[in-house]
């Protein structure tokens, strides 16, 4: 009797995020790592395809469905506040300096129990569109969380 394959569960609380600059070729494999982040939450890893409906004459059982344009959700990263300012500097560079074309690739790795990558998502040509500092409240007991919202031009997923 053949042994059944039972994959180890993937825990979504172990992940790391790396920001990298793409070299002139634009290839994902030729990038230079700029910084990593220890984020507490990452949401918005999604792609949506709008189907194209084509009505054909003589086709009485319904219209044909074809693949349409793909759109990507804004990815929201939340992390504990630190003294490092590299993500703010990127936002400021794009916002104030007119370097609106300065995009980074963002790699999100889901790790297993031993720390080895299991799934890797890459956001292509990410652009910071919102930076939110934590609310300052002397009576609150929670850790300050800041948010970074990223628009991007593509999402890839590879299994390790």
Image (cartoon, rainbow, N blue to C red):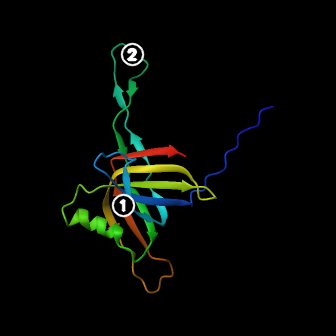
Looking at the rendered structure, the secondary structure element under dot 1 is: strand
Residue 74 appears anywhere in the view: no
Q: Quadrant of residue 3?
A: top right
Query: Quick one: quadrant of the N terminus?
Result: top right
Q: CA distance from mark 2 to mark 1?
A: 45 Å
Answer few, some or many: residues within 10 Å of disc 1's Cα (few below 14, many 20 plus, some between 14 and 19).
many
The furthest residue to the left: 98
Q: Residue at x 67, y 49 (%)?
A: 8
Q: Earlier in the sequence, mark 2 or mark 1?
A: 2
Q: In the image, what residue occupies the spot 44% across and 19% down?
A: 61
Residue furthest bottom in the image: 138
Residue 132: where, in percent of width, then height?
Answer: 35, 69
Q: Give percent across and percent down for residue 19.
A: 39, 59
- In the picture, measured across the screen, residue 105 lies left or right of residue 112, that is left
The residue identified by callout 2 is 59
In this rendering, the answer to whether 7 lies above or below 57 is: below
Where 151 sits versus 89, above or below? above
Most extreme residue toward the top, as rendered?
Answer: 58
Q: Which residue is mark 1?
A: 149
């Amino acid at each position: 009797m053949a042994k059944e394959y039972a994959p180890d569960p993937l825990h979504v609380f172990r992940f790391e995020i790396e920001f990298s600059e793409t070299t002139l070729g634009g290839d994902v494999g030729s990038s230079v790592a700029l910084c990593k982040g220890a984020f507490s939450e990452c949401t918005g890893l999604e792609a949506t395809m709008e189907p194209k409906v084509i009505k054909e004459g003589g086709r009485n059982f319904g219209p044909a469905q074809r693949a349409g344009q793909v759109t990507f959700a804004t990815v929201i990263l939340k992390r504990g506040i630190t003294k490092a300012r590299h993500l703010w500097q990127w936002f400021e560079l794009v916002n104030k300096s007119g370097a609106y074309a300065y995009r980074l690739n963002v790699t999100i790795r889901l790790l297993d129990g031993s720390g080895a990558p299991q799934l890797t998502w890459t956001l292509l040509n990410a652009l910071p569109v919102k930076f939110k500092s934590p609310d300052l409240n002397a009576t609150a007991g929670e850790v300050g969380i800041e948010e970074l919202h990223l628009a991007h031009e593509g999402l890839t997923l590879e299994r390790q």
